[in-house]
Image (spheres, rainbow, N blue to C red):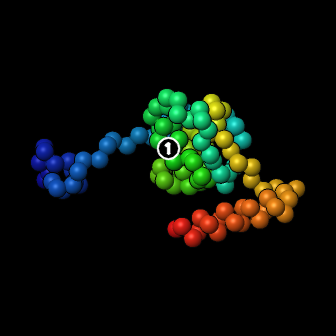
Amino acid sequence: MPTPDVPFGKHADEPARPAFVRPFTLTRGRTVPRVDLPFEATLVTTPQSHARVLGEHARALALCDGRSVAEVAAAMKLPIGVVRVLVGDLVADGHVAVRRTLTERSSFDERRDLLQRTLAGLKVS
């Protein structure tokens, strides 16, 4: 039987975890980003990104530079749909810019640049 000082299922030496917050509350119930934002889109912060941003938006902003939307979601340990909404807000407000992803019309140079950046990222890892 647990004591009042130790929550049920916890050990006395474990730090208390914050209460679970439903992810949709972070986006005020919104499920669609304000801008079109592919999962693989690479994000870069803008000079305006130093403006005051609070809460989960600030946490996302700190992770955006040079990462994809999917990588930011993984780092934040949040569902990608929630992170797309948060990052979409940052893009719409001018804090983050989105690098174009490749399309069928992408040039050879654009494709080579993506491969070089990918290889460079793998070498760092």
Task: List x then y, in percent, for residue 68.
Answer: 61, 53
Which residue is pictured at 15% across the width and 54% down the height?
12
Task: List x then y, in percent, for residue 65.
Answer: 57, 48
Regarding residue 123, the answer to whether it shows in the image is: yes
Which residue is pictured at 29% across the width and 47% down the height?
17
- On screen, 57 above or below 8? above
Task: List x then y, in percent, for residue 73.
Answer: 54, 51
Task: List x then y, in percent, for residue 61.
Answer: 53, 41
Q: How many marks?
A: 1
Which residue is pictured at 51% across the width and 55% down the height?
74
Q: Amino acid at mark 1?
A: Ala
- Front residue of 112/42: it is 112
- Front residue of 103/111: it is 111
Disc 1 is placed on an element classified as: helix
Left or right of residue 47, residue 55 in this image: left
Residue under label 1: 62
